[in-house]
Image (cartoon, rainbow, N blue to C red):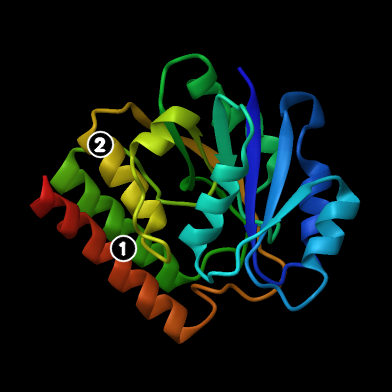
Amino acid sequence: MKISVVIPTLNEEEAIGDVVRAVPQNRVAEIIVVDNGSTDSTAKQASLAGARVVYEPCRGYGFACLAGAQAVKDADVIVFLDGDRSDNPEQLEKIARPVLDNRADLVIGSRIKGKLDKGSMPFHGRWGNRFIVFLLRMLYDVNISDIGSFRAIRTQCLFDLNMEQMTYGWPVEMVVKAACKGFQIQSVPIHYRKRIGESKVTGTLKGTILATYFMFLVPLKYLFKA
């Protein structure tokens, strides 16, 4: 089965080159870096490191992830990871293996059950994450321990979800819709590192509030739609 890696980015020039080079080249068909409107040399550094760069002018995490997925050529599995070095690409096999072995349709790397480097996840980020995971368990009977960015999903399954949340709600929407469709979802423990640069979500008050709002709203929204 072919694996494509999609890395959404916004002003990650310091980290993106190392992230791309750390992806196990012998395990993936391609590496796609999505530049979501960077004002620095993110795209140049990604290209120099060997990635194929696509551009998504509509600002938003979901927009960037979808643009990367749509740019995938013929992969069976898509692995999403962040371009700030917090997600360790060397763990790609661990994330993708349950999907490759037909034991899961969606796998999410669990920072909570794995190893957290000091300063890698602020207290409010951990609290919010635990709350959303609890909500997903109660409403959708999803047995996961994290809602992080490092994840693998069967390509056809992703497009079957008809994703709609193009900003902060994308990660939760994927889990909610996968659960509604009866897809097999797993968590695997990962090593989560302190990112390079400031987080666009937990690093700002605005980002934290918006992420919390969308992640709380999305499970309720699709529950009532079901």
User: Which amino acid does the dot numbered 2 rest on?
Assistant: Ala
| Residue 168, percent from left and from top | 41, 65
Residue 187 against residue 115 in the figure, above or below: above
Q: CA distance from mark 1 to mark 2?
A: 16 Å
| Residue 70, percent from left and from top | 55, 44
Q: Is residue 12 left or right of residue 56?
A: right
| Image quarter hosting the N terminus | top right
Q: Is residue 195 left or right of residue 142?
A: right
| Image quarter hosting the C terminus | top left
**Sequence-earlier tag: 1 or 2:** 2
Specify whether residue 187 is in view: no
Q: Is residue 62 left or right of residue 183?
A: right
Residue 186 against residue 44 in the figure, above or below: above
| Residue 166, percent from left and from top | 42, 62
Instruction: State the image quarter where residue 11 is shown.
Output: bottom right
Residue 35 against residue 144 in the figure, above or below: below
Q: Which mark is residue 215?
A: 1
Disc 2 residue crowd, few under 14, some 14–19, many 20+, Cα 10 Å: some
Q: Residue at x 83, y 70 (%)?
A: 41
Disc 1 residue crowd, few under 14, some 14–19, many 20+, Cα 10 Å: many
Q: Which mark is residue 179?
A: 2
Q: Residue at x 33, y 57 (%)?
A: 130
Helix, strand or loop at mark 2 = helix
* Numbered disc total: 2
Q: Residue furthest top?
A: 101
Q: Residue furthest right?
A: 48
Residue situated in front as seen by the camera: 111 or 157: 157
